[in-house]
Amino acid sequence: MQAEIIAIGDEILIGQTIDTNSSFIATQLNLNGISVRQKRVIADDADAIKDALDSIASGTKLVFMTGGLGPTKDDITKKTLLEYFGGEMVFHESIYEHIEQLFASFGRKPSPVNKGQAMLPSSCWPVINKMGTAPGMRFEKDGVFYFSTPGVPYETEHLVEMEIIPWINSNLKKGTVVHKTILTQGVPESELADKLEAFEDNLPEGVKLAYLPSAGMVKLRLTSYHGTEAEARVVVDEQIEEIKTILGAVVFGAEAQTLQEVIGIGLRESGATLSTAESCTGGYIASLITSIPGSSDYFMGSVVSYSNKVKQDLLDVEVETLKKHGAVSKEVVMQMALGAQKKFGTTFSIATSGVAGPGGGSDEKPVGTVWIATATPDGVKAKKFSFGNNRKRNIRKAALMALDLLRREIQKIEV
């Protein structure tokens, strides 16, 4: 089954708001075996909305529209859909009761403007929005189903995941599309493609491999359109295992897992603890680690040693080492890791020191130069990396690489 997504909003077109709704909808559709033909962003304009609906591709059975359902005059989607699908505005008492209850939970009463949100085209089936005041709407025309949801992300997410997708799965026949994703760290997309060239050349019919790179990692997504859902899953699982065999330790997880989740599992299972000593990453590693609920079980703390004085006073980095080698060096980062390991009394520690940029580089240590050290019960190791000249990407890449080096130590993989 084929779908299209239309995001409505001038704020998206001018870059004031990022369109996360389309991404979420596309993800949910793909998880449920529905392929997305295209996504579009259009203006808050009646003609633009009608033109978009008129230009739906042949074969599309589902159309998702987000935005323009608020109570103010600039929210024109509902009125435009009434003109497009016909009918008249009808007041829905049950929807207004929900709006009243929602306002009462905030200690308020709805205004006349809010009451207008219970007015919907008679040509639609209402979809009650438990997370907000603007209901979703479902229309049907010439065998195509149209779904309209608010622009507020958490409201659209609730409606799509809890109301619309279940309705589609219960009422409409859909084709088979199965996706599975594995996650790799530390190897560029081009190198992965080289390693997987023969594998790609021999993929079964109806199976595709996609490379999804981001700063510091690459996702590999396998998609199968093969036979029944059960058959497609078998085919994808077989190919995933072959990729893992080819890439080995480069693969660290699957689907929506993160490095910090994988590390947390490893530390908790082994009863080990962790600390960090961060210079160029400025606490970002600690932030990633503590984003996992329950991380206090294994993460003891961090020293953000941005200055040399803090490196000396809190991490016992030797003055002579700093003078001789500089802060961005193998010797200093190793002492930082050992200092954090000792201070916090942890099993493992990781440390970073580098030139994040955009300034501060030299011929010997250009922007993007980062040293990362891991201290373990068996000693301390350090590796040098060159990440590039973009500060934000350098910080992200350094943090993920540090976590991956730690993962390999925990899993006893040769670093």
Image (cartoon, rainbow, N blue to C red):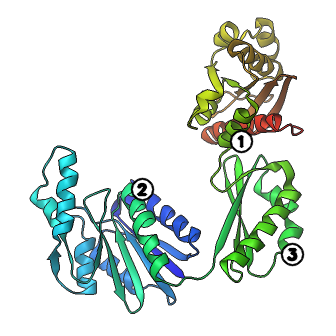
Q: Amino acid at mark 2?
A: Gly
Report which quarter residue 171 is drawn in: bottom left
What residue is pinned by disc 1?
Answer: 388
Contact check, label 1 and label 2, Cβ < 8 Å = no
What label does residue 15 carry, if any? 2
Residue projecting furthest to the left: 112
Instruction: Please tell me how crowded label 2 is: few (under 14), some (14-19), or many (20+) other residues with Cα within 10 Å.
Output: few
Q: Quadrant of the C terminus?
A: top right
* Identity, as a three-letter code, of the amino acid under mark 1: Gly
The reply to whether callout 2 and callout 3 are in contact (CB within 8 Å) is no
Question: Does residue 389 appear left or right of residue 194 in this picture?
Answer: left
User: Nearer the N terminus, badge 1 or badge 3?
Assistant: 3
Residue identified by numbered label 3: 202
Task: Look at the numbered disc 3 and give the secondary structure of its residue.
Answer: loop
Is residue 367 visible in the rendered structure shown here?
A: no
- Marks 1/2: CA–CA distance: 27 Å
**Disc on the earlier residue, 2 or 3:** 2
Q: Note whether 180 is above or below 277 in the view shown.
A: below
Name the residue: 15% across, 66% down: 116
